[in-house]
Amino acid sequence: MTIENVILEARNLKVIRGGSLLVDVPSLQIREGETLSLIGPNGAGKTTLLQALSYLMRPSAGDILFRGEKVSAGYATLDYRRKLAMVFQEPLLFDTTVSENVASGLKIRGLGSGMIKQVVTKQLNRFGIGHLWDRSARTLSGGEAQRTSLARAFAIKPEILFLDEPFASLDPPTREAIIVDLGKAIAETGTTTAIATHDRNEALRLSDRIAMMDEGKIVQIGSPSDVMNRPVSEGVAAFVGIETILQGRVRERKRGSVIVDVNGKEIEAVGDFEAGANVALCIRPENVTLSLPPAASATSARNVFRGRINRITPLGLVVKIEMACGFPLVAYVTENAVEDLGLREGKDVTAQFKATAIHIIRKGST
Amino acid sequence: MDIILDGIRKAFYLLFTFDAEVLGITWFSLKVSGTATFISLFIGMSVGTAVALTQFPGRRFVVSLINTGMALPPVVVGLFVTIFLWRNGPLGFMEILYTPAAMIIAQAIIATPIVTGISLAAMQQLPKKLRLQILALGATRLQMVRILIREARLPLLAAVMAGFGGVISEVGASIMVGGNIKGYTRVLTTATVMETSRGNFDIAIALGIVLLIFAYMINLVLTQIQQRERPR
């Protein structure tokens, strides 16, 4: 990565409020044209980080560099703020018409009315609300209001767009439709975007990179598949939907893989760790397959375990199966599979997962 | 019962024939209270907005002072304005006691805390994040304050109405600093007091009806404002 395509950089950024450290980010770079998601539980500091990056909140320490220039020193705060746009969870519309709302950023910049009309028309159409031009913002539905808020943000052609939980208060169908339109708008305009969300699926759909935050720190940053499949800690693993996290110790090191002892059971996983290392094994529920108890011969295969179903929870598209096979294990299967295999609570099944589907986190050796 | 019915009949006669005296007093009341409200609007809205949008030590104390001021007894205001404007008082040299100017000063002092308090509440009722949103749209501080005032325009209108309602209906201060001089400092309330004490109930009721109409119109607008919703 060359320095030219970093549009925004944070260095040693700290936000301290009321004596507590809300954000502590030694280094963060946002690349031109990328969409970066900040994910993490509530209170992880996502919103605070966005506000510090956008200079809506003055950082307690550290620097923000926009295109290599320090904001507030080389770059006046107002000039910087005029290059960005922000959309919050609440649409925060003004008490006027939809078109006046979308025009507000342009009016603040003193643009002419002909120019404003052209831009507003284009943005309203982009978000499918052209017919709401004269409507009072007070009469909009939640989805229409958030579309207006997004159109207002895109109207100023921001060089960087900050989105703070923009879909959190929308119902699922509305959210779905707006995510599609937003994704299109970002792609068409090539706008650099930073989005804070507690919903990992939103992050997966929109982002080029994901930064996982916890207690004010960025604990992992990488491609969506990196963060989803190769979490650096158990905390990240749990947040990204890895339901099975097993504590174990490496018993044997083989070529390219290890045998890990978990509660006396042997699990083979791909990785390179010395014998005796304490590790956590992460198994995504989607990667566990279930079958009916097999003939004795098949059980000698690696990572095949016989267990009993403790609980079955329908999750919509998939069904969550919690089972005990010497250690707790969670699998997602389709409703069809539940029917075909006759799965029910208390039934014995065989679970299987590949050695390559296990992610190993080192916990230090003893 | 006759005394009331007769009074009301005569009162409507006075109103519908546009009696010069009733009309003159009404017009003068509007001028004095309108000017006082206008002055209080300037001071009250600026102070209210400033207190709402800034953080400083002792802010709570200032807010409690403003809220106390909203309940300032007009008689006490009248007393102090009279003392200050008395011939050998601190501002006696101005020689404005028993003039409309003195009434405007007294009424402005009564209305200012009311306008300040309601402006403060109006600005604080706006979502906190709205300020961030306006800044993120690229506004300067001045532009931000202008937009916030525009967003709070209806509750601010309520502040104006409440201020005006407070002073058009007060009698204590007006009679003390104005003196109820016929054709010079006589307003609706002071005239009502005088006519009642003289037993001229017809004109007193006519003046009372005018006051009630003002009160009704003010409250009609206030209710409309309160029933409106903010956009999401």
Image (cartoon, rainbow, N blue to C red):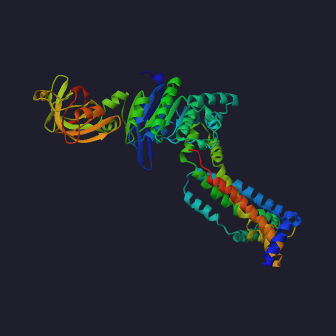
Residue A344 percent across, percent down from the top left: 23, 40
**Which image quarter: residue B159?**
bottom right
Quadrant of image for the N terminus of chain B: bottom right
Q: Is residue A137 left or right of residue A319?
A: right
Tell me if I can see residue A255 in this picture.
yes
Q: How far across and down, in percent of the image, does residue A330 sit? A: 25, 37
Residue at 30 percent of width and 34 percent of height: A335
Which of the pair A68/A264 is nearer the observer? Answer: A264
State the residue at coordinates (46%, 31%).
A9
Picture quadrant where residue A209 is located? top left
**Residue at 34% in and 27% down:** A225
Of B209 and A272, the residue lying toward us: B209
* Total labels drawn: 0
Q: Position of residue B119 (x, y in %)?
A: 64, 54
Image quarter of the C terminus of chain B = top right
Q: Residue at x 78, y 73 (%)?
A: B193
- Where residue A217 sits in the image (x, y, percent)? 38, 39
Q: Nearer the viewer, residue A181 or A162?
A: A181
Where residue A304 sits, quadrant-wise, is top left
Q: Is residue B28 left or right of residue A327?
A: right
Give the vertical position of B218 relative to A117 (above or below).
Answer: below
- Residue B88 visible from this viewpoint: no
- Nearest the viewer among B165 and A170 is A170
Up-down relation of residue B88 to residue A125 (above or below): below
